[in-house]
Image (tube, helix red, strand yellow):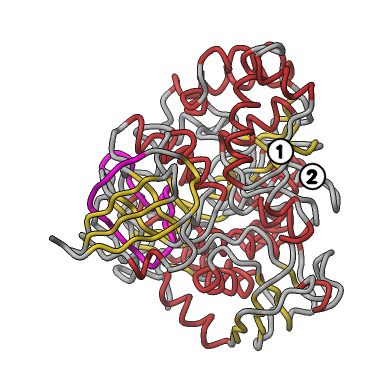
Amino acid sequence: MREKTVLKGRKVVGGVVEGEALVTHQGIDCNGGIDPRTGVVIERRHELNGKSVKDKILVFPYGKGSSGWARQFYFLSKKFGNGPKAIINKRLMEMVVVAAIATKTPMVICTDPDPTMSIGNGDWVRVDADKGYIEVFRK
Amino acid sequence: MFLSKKEERMLKGEDGPAAQWAMSFLVEYGEALGAEKLIDISSVAVGWCPPFQEILPPDVFSDLLTRGFKVPAYSLLIGVERKHWMKLGIPKEEVEKQRFMDERAKDIGLALTSTCAPYTVGYMPTKGSHCSVVEASLIPFVNSVLGARTLRESSQSVIASGIVGKSPNAGFHLDENRGANILVKVKTRMLRSIDFDLLGYHVGELVGVDVPAFIGIRKATLENLKYLCASFSASGGIGLFHIIGVTPEAPTLKAAFRGNKPKEAIDVTGKELEETKDKLCTGGSDKVDLVVFGCPHYTIEEVGKVARLLRGRRIHDNVTLWIFTPHSTRTIAELTGLESLITSAGGMLLSDTCPWVLRYWVEGSGLPEKVRVVATDSTKMAHYLPALYGVDVWYGSTESCVKAALTGVWES
């Protein structure tokens, strides 16, 4: 049995999903930072550069960059099927909220502890967004 | 969330599918943001171009075309160049699609400003007024320079806001969220737009979504602030900032912080700005193929500056030079004789679009195929172009870029 920790957060968009975590300490830009046709992070100098967000539990501190964020996330997720399974953020950014609502992607805000520190790349994460409950199984 | 009787009726669909969709979206959005109610807004700035229809249910889009926006609406930049589309290789059907959208504008209460910087051509929400605005560089401009109030909106949410004339009463609409929480001490002289551009890019990376207050900037032009707003919303997610003694909600440090304690203080010197400049240049060949100006869209002053630098000269045979403006600025430039200075030198004055939206909104267009190396005076362009097109980028002052256009070579 893998070591399990639990984080409590706040629901933004409900739903229950589980999957492998992809974690970054840097903000994510969905319009110009991720190629919707492949799901791969293309932003130069980004620590996730070259990695795909597809079907991941995507953990990042906040959304940044273009306000085409939500529109492009919609294309990423709904048109090309390359979206993440869920979003966990530390800070609330309106554009990410709209992205999650428009695609019905479960999303939780967790301010303390910092989810980008408490969750590691490759950890198995179960998100119950309705309850704001995140279970993390260490890799 | 509390809804008035009228809002309840809209939610039930009594005012048609567009209002119903908008209200249901705003309720979900508002609840996610922790809003207790909706507030009335006085205007919206919206994207109005073809791929946009894909994100709205068809019955909502057609109902919007019939009933129009509830409040005055202004449009942002588009994915085609209405005049020079053929020269840019933009497919005709894309231009037709945009024409369909354009022809609806007069019936739905939309002004076709067609720019990322509509404040340079007449969109000026006033201090304390509520609005809903999308476009990353426009959002901090409206919140901070004009002192109007908007959330960091998205394509979908501004349309919803425009349909019913309402926004969730949360975020930057509320006094308590408008105070600074980070102090930025600027310890270098801020004279030119490039200084503001680099400052913004550097601070955006450090600050993320917080609200910085800058001290040490004594004055700033419209153009300076335009660059500042664009750069830190490319590297970060700043939606509101204050400059003590310059922006309207920051006559003093105390006023800017609204009772918040700074959680961090950042010093910025010329060294950080130099490093930022180096970081934005990808290296590679010094032979420049394309020079891009106008991110955000150039003002008439900026067009004039480049036009005068090009007067009586000829850009290098291997270089393409593009300057992007709103069409109304191009009209002024044409009338003033500035456009002919640019075209005589071999450059192009283009309107209403930019290399970035060309790529994402119109399949198969974007930069000319032969382009491998781009020079630009915009950190935002320098930030995005290498990732989008795989090109190398040189970033520098407007003068350096003009020089590269004339000689075909970037001088580091």
Q: Is residue A34 magenta?
A: yes
Residue A38 is labelled as none
Residue under the point 49% across and 70% down? B205
Residue B340 in the image: state x and y as whole percent: 65, 46
Please tell me if label 2 and label 1 are on a single chain: yes
Please state which of residues B165 and B373 is positioned toward the viewer in this rendering: B165
Residue B130 is labelled as 2
Q: Are marks 2 and 1 in contact (CB under 8 Å)?
A: yes
Residue B138 in the image: state x and y as whole percent: 66, 51
Judging by the rendered image, the residue that carries numbered circle 1 is B167
Q: Chain of mark 2?
A: B
Distance (Cα) linking label 2 and label 1: 8 Å
Residue under the point 31% across and 66% down? A47
Whether residue B359 is visible here, answered yes or no, is no
Numbered disc 2: secondary structure:
loop
Q: Chain of mark 1?
A: B
Q: Which residues are magenta?
A: A16-38
From the viewer's perspective, tell me whether residue A106 is left or right of residue A23: right
* Residue type (three-letter) at the residue carrying disc 2: His
Among all residues in the image, which is located at the extreme front? Answer: A1
Mark 2 nearby-residue class (10 Å; few <14, some 14–19, many ≥20) = many
Mark 1 nearby-residue class (10 Å; few <14, some 14–19, many ≥20) = many
Residue B102 position by quadrant: top right
* Residue type (three-letter) at the residue carrying disc 1: Ser
Q: Nearer the viewer, mark 2 or mark 1?
A: 1
Q: Quadrant of the N terminus of chain B?
A: top right
Q: Is residue B243 magenta?
A: no
Residue under the point 50% across and 55% down? A65
